[in-house]
Image (spheres, grey):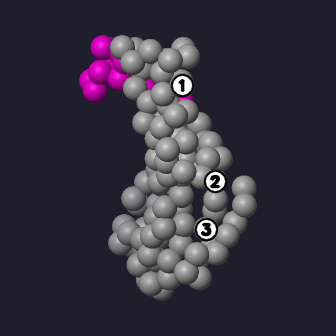
Amino acid sequence: MSIMMKDGVKMKNYGYTIEFYKLDKRCKSGEKLVEKVDYEVTNEDAMKRIVEHLYNDGFPRDKYRLEFFETWVTKTNMMSKEQFQERYDTPYYCSPSSETYWSM
């Protein structure tokens, strides 16, 4: 994982994360999260190609749903107003950008 600077904020350049959901009628939502995989890809078009390749190679659309996100997002610390990076899937109450985090 490389770290670069953008507008004075240290940014982790790890790329994207794909979430694999398997359709499952036993679940209330009709699907369940099976796995999250991080990819070191630098642009969205490359991720779209990877997802399309995965659909064609073992994860058929009628049984799986694949969704990708940028792994790291930039947020602002609620107390110090400084920007920082955290994973996209960090729970709200665990993020320094939320009031809940600071009230515990």
User: Would you name the residue on which mark 3 appears?
Assistant: 11
Q: Is residue 92 left or right of residue 35?
A: left
Residue at 63%, 62% (x, y): give it. Answer: 12
Q: Label 3 is placed on what type of residue? A: Met
Pick the quarter of the image with the C terminus. bottom left
Which mark, by number, is residue 14? Answer: 2
Does label 3 or label 1 sit earlier along the sequence? 3
Residue 56 lies in magenta, yes or no? no
| x and y percentages locating residue 22 in the rendered image | 42, 20
SS at badge 2: loop
Magenta stretch, residue numbers: 21-35
Which mark, by number, is residue 65? Answer: none
| Residue 21, image quadrant | top left
SS at badge 3: strand
Residue at 44%, 30% (x, y): give it. Answer: 66
Crowdedness of circle 2 by 10 Å Cα count: few (<14), some, many (20+)?
A: some
Q: In this view, does 4 lie above or below 26?
A: below
Which mark, by number, is residue 53? Answer: 1
Using the image as rendered, state which of residue 21 and residue 25 is in the foreground: 21
Q: Residue 20: in sight, yes or no?
A: no
Q: Label 2 is placed on what type of residue? A: Tyr
| x and y percentages locating residue 73 in the rendered image | 49, 61
Q: In this view, does 71 lie above or below 34?
A: below
Q: Label 1 is placed on what type of residue? A: His
Q: How far apart are marks 1 and 2 (CA)?
A: 20 Å
Pick the quarter of the image with the N terminus. bottom right
